[in-house]
């Protein structure tokens, strides 16, 4: 059974920080998620709330990037 995220919702600040960490424009980030640049902008400025489905997608994306970084740091040892 899949785990359901409980607790605080993902914030616009978290989305913005993650996008900047990936060094992507709003348009590029939106392409990866299947949404428009304006939707990314609205999420980052908290003009619109991120749906539960996209929140799960963003959380999974963030976790995958963190795992990739951790594994990347273990290479060459």
Image: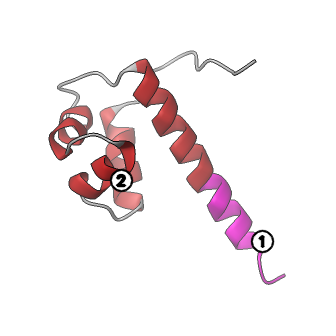
Q: Is the residue 17 above or below the residue 10 in the image?
A: below
Residue 24 in the magenta stretch? The answer is: no
* Residue behind mark 1: 74
Instruction: Return the residue nearer the eye: 15 or 25.
Output: 25
Left or right: 28, with 63 as reference point: left
Q: Is the residue 70 above or below the residue 35 in the image?
A: below
Which residue is at a point 77% across and 77% down the rendered structure image?
Answer: 75
Which residue is at a point 18% across and 33% down the rendered structure image?
Answer: 42
Q: How is the image coloured?
A: secondary structure
* Residue behind mark 2: 19
Label 2: few (<14), some (14–19) or many (≥20) C-alpha neighbours in 10 Å: some
- The answer for how far apart the CA atoms under marks 1 and 2 are is 24 Å
Residue 69 in the magenta stretch? The answer is: yes
User: Secondary structure beneath disc 2?
Assistant: helix
Q: Which mark is residue 21?
A: none
User: Secondary structure beneath disc 1?
Assistant: helix
Q: Are marks 1 and 2 in contact (CB under 8 Å)?
A: no
Q: Position of residue 43 (x, y in %)?
A: 26, 33
Mark 1 vs 2, N-terminal side:
2
Q: Is the residue 35 above or below the residue 26 in the image?
A: above
The residue most toward the bottom is 76
Instruction: Return the residue nearer the eye: 56 or 70.
Output: 56
Q: Position of residue 40 (x, y in %)?
A: 24, 41
Q: Position of residue 59 (x, y in %)?
A: 52, 36
Q: Position of residue 30 (x, y in %)?
A: 29, 47
The range drawn in magenta is 66-77
Question: Residue 52's image quarter?
Answer: top left
């Amino acid at each position: 059974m899949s785990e359901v995220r409980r607790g605080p919702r993902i914030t616009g600040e978290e989305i913005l920080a993650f996008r900047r960490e990936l060094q992507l424009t709003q348009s590029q980030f939106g392409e990866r998620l299947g949404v428009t640049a304006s939707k990314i902008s609205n999420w980052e400025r908290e003009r619109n709330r991120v749906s539960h489905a996209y929140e799960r997608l963003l959380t999974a994306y963030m976790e995958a990037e963190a795992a990739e970084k951790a594994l990347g740091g273990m290479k060459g040892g």
